[in-house]
Structures are given as structure tokens and as C-alpha cells.
């Protein structure tokens, strides 16, 4: 293959930096320790790379890349296993770019060939070098450098606004369900928004305040179910921000299913041990149907809650996604992929 047709190191590094940003901007030390753990689990006697070695892999202006290390890094950052060989091949065949060679020579002439770690860590993801599109849920052309520069980190005022609006949104959903006697819950839309946008523990705050305020809407049992709301906040928050499950629509769909299952795993024991299987919720009509068909109470409550929880969390999750996408179009949110950040960006002109 002619050099003109080969990819540059800077292009690979740019995609690697974007992948790290989408995975929640994991610290270099954490990446290094996870690579070491992976090597040990594979039975290798080799020690893990140093933090500085991992940091150097993300530095632009390189003349060559360690293909094996690049493969290990993208594995830790959550790239699909099928794409890892492509990353390794790209890194192994990459050539220095002309401007990168000049930059390295100029830097060495000034007596330093390393970029300070502090500057590297603080560089906004949107101002990194652009390369070929990621193979991991990033739509080509959906994030331009000028668009990325308009997005900023959330400040204290924005965080307080998101949390406050989320609490009100949860209580409004709770009120609507009680008034219309819907077989759903709708009390976690705001929890999902805050957990993804601000962080999982901010989502926990929203969950606790919501269920405490829900006492005057549905009774004292609302306090006990704050545990369910709390678990939903943690799964949504860590799933999206740490494990990159909001980088593509299919992965986000899986995340909402995990939230539903996790919430049922907490709710069913509470219902059975404290409330004899039900609190009078409209969705509990399924329990009586299953019991009339001969199912024991435990299985009837589990089946009913799973059905209600799956339906509720799918609707809740995708309503929350609309809000999250709107916020992420203006503010930096770790773990949100471009296709979810601007879901209409790739729509053809003239489409509704």
C-alpha cells in the first residue's frame, strides 16, 4: 500500500481520544491498571503499562504507534470486540503525518518532547484532532470542531437547574399516574435525566427527594420505594457515563432493560415482605389474574412487576433521552454518543 493511501498516526490518535471521551474520559492510571488486570487474566507474565506510556498513546504528533497497546486500550474503553483487530491494524500501518513530524522536530528543538499531563487531561474532547470516523457508534460528520467548541461543561447553576427540574418532572409523572390510574409509574424520568447528565449520585438525590415528596401523593409506602428509584439512578448513571451504554441507540435500549430488571429485583422483595404483594397500584391487576391461573403469589408479583417495569422504563428511558439529547447538544455530557446527542443531525433535508 502506498504511503499516500495509508492512515496517519494523528488520525488514529484522534479517534482514540474521542473513544476515551465517549467512555467517560477515564483516567490514564485506570486504563493502565485495567490493561494489567486483563493481561493477568489472560495468563500473561508481562506487567501492565505505566500511566505515562498510556498517556503517550493519546498524544498527537507521534511518529509510530504501539499496535498491541492500542488494541488493549480500546478494549478497556469498551470498543466492540469485533472492531479491536481493525484498531490494531490501523495502528500498525499508520504513518507520521507531515505536520506531525515538523511539530515533533520543533518541540525537540525547544528542549521538550512531552505534552504536560495537566494540559492533556483538560483538553476538551471537541478540540481534538479529527480523523476517520469511529467504528463505535459515532456518526461521520455529526461533530465538527466548530460545533464542539460551542459546548461547555455544566456549571453549578445548570446542575441545580437540571436537578430541580428533574424532581418536578418525577412528581408530575407520579401525579398523572395516580390521577389517571395508569398501570405505569412515570416517577423516574427526571431521575434518568439527572443520573445521565449530572451523575449517578445526583440522580440518587433526585430519587430520594422524589419519593419523600411522593408521600403526600400516594402514601407512606412511597418512602420504601425510594430504594427502587435509587437503584434506577445508579444503573442509568453508571451505565451511561462509565460503561458507554448511551453511545448508540441499541446500547441505550439495553440499558433501559437493565434498569427495568434491576428495579424489579428491588421492588418485588419490598412488595412481598412489607405489603403482602401489593400497594393498590393499577398495574397490580396482573397479580390477581396470574393467581387465578394458579400461580403462587411470589411468581404472580414478580411477573406483574416485570411487565409493568419493562413497559414503564422503556417509555421513561426514551422520554428522558429526548431531554438528555437536547442538553447534550449544548453541554458536554460524558458517555453520550453523537447519534444520541443530535438524533436529527443525519436526517435528510426536508424531512419532518
Image: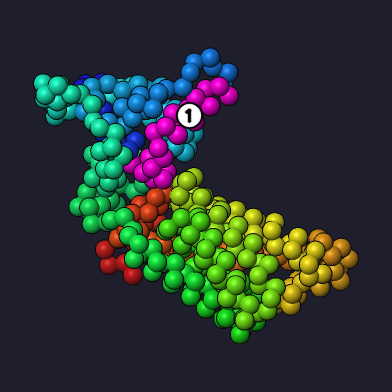
Q: Is residue 280 above or below residue 82?
A: below
**Number of numbered callouts drawn:** 1
Callout 1: few (<14), some (14-19), or many (20+) C-alpha neighbours within 10 Å? some
Residue 247: percent from the left, percent from the top?
Answer: 43, 49
Q: Is residue 110 left or right of residue 155?
A: left
223 or 5: which is nearer to us?
Answer: 223
Give coordinates of residue 80: x percent, y percent. Answer: 47, 38
Residue 28 in magenta stretch: yes
Secondary structure beneath label 1: helix
Query: In the drawing, does residue 98 fall left or right of residue 88?
Result: left
Q: Which residue has dot 1 on it?
A: 33
Is 215 colored magenta in this rendering? no
Q: Quadrant of the N terminus?
A: top left
Residue at 64% from the left image edge and 62% from the top image edge: 227
Classified by dominant secondary structure, the portion drawn in magenta counts as helix
347 or 240: nearer the viewer: 240
| For residue 104, side relative to residue 38 (left or right) | left
Q: Is residue 83 visible?
A: no
- Residue 94 position (above or below residue 281): above
Q: Residue furthest right?
A: 294
- The residue that appears at 21% across and 28% down in the rendered structure is 61
Q: Residue at x 42, y 49 (%)?
A: 335
Whether residue 189 can be seen here = yes
Out of 20 and 347, give the one closest to the viewer: 20
Segment colored magenta: 18-41
- In which image quadrant can residue 217 be found? bottom right
Pinpoint residue 19: horizontal percent, then vertical percent.
Answer: 37, 40
Give the image location of residue 326, x and y in percent.
36, 64
Q: Residue at x 34, y 26 (%)?
A: 52
Colour style of the rendered protein structure: rainbow
Location of residue 158 by image quarter: bottom left
Residue 269, above or below 140: below
Amino acid at each position: 500500500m502506498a504511503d499516500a493511501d495509508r492512515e496517519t498516526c494523528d488520525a488514529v490518535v484522534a479517534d482514540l481520544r474521542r473513544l476515551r471521551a465517549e467512555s467517560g474520559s477515564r483516567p490514564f492510571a485506570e486504563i493502565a491498571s485495567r490493561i494489567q488486570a486483563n493481561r493477568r487474566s489472560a495468563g500473561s507474565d508481562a506487567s501492565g503499562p505505566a500511566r505515562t506510556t498510556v498517556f503517550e498513546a493519546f498524544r498527537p504528533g507521534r511518529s509510530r504507534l504501539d499496535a498491541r497497546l492500542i488494541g488493549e486500550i480500546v478494549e478497556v474503553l469498551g470498543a466492540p470486540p469485533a472492531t479491536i483487530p481493525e484498531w490494531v491494524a490501523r495502528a500498525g500501518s499508520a504513518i507520521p503525518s507531515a505536520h506531525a513530524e515538523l511539530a515533533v522536530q520543533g518541540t525537540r528543538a525547544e528542549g521538550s518532547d512531552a505534552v504536560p499531563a495537566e494540559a492533556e487531561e483538560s483538553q476538551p474532547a471537541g478540540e481534538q484532532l479529527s480523523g476517520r470516523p469511529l467504528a463505535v457508534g459515532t456518526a461521520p460528520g455529526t461533530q465538527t470542531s466548530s460545533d464542539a467548541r460551542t459546548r461547555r461543561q455544566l456549571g453549578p447553576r445548570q446542575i441545580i437547574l437540571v436537578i430541580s427540574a428533574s424532581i418536578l418532572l418525577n412528581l408530575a409523572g407520579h401525579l398523572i399516574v395516580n390521577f389517571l390510574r395508569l398501570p405505569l409509574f412515570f416517577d423516574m424520568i427526571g431521575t434518568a435525566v439527572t443520573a445521565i447528565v449530572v451523575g449517578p449520585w445526583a440522580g440518587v438525590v433526585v430519587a430520594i427527594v422524589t419519593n419523600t415528596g411522593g408521600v403526600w401523593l400516594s402514601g407512606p409506602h412511597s418512602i420504601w420505594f425510594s430504594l427502587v428509584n435509587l437503584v434506577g439512578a445508579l444503573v442509568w448513571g453508571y451505565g451511561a457515563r462509565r460503561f458507554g451504554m448511551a453511545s448508540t441507540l441499541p446500547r441505550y435500549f439495553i440499558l433501559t432493560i437493565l434498569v427495568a430488571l434491576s428495579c424489579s429485583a428491588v421492588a418485588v422483595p419490598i412488595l412481598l415482605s412489607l405489603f403482602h404483594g401489593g400497594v393498590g397500584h393499577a398495574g397490580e391487576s396482573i397479580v390477581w389474574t396470574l393467581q387465578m391461573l394458579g400461580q403462587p403469589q411470589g411468581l404472580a408479583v414478580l411477573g406483574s412487576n416485570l411487565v409493568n417495569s419493562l413497559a414503564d422504563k422503556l417509555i421513561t428511558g426514551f422520554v428522558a433521552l429526548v431531554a438528555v439529547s437536547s442538553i447534550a447538544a449544548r453541554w458536554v455530557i460524558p458517555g453520550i454518543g453523537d447519534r444520541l446527542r443530535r438524533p436529527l443531525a443525519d436526517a435528510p433535508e426536508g424531512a419532518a
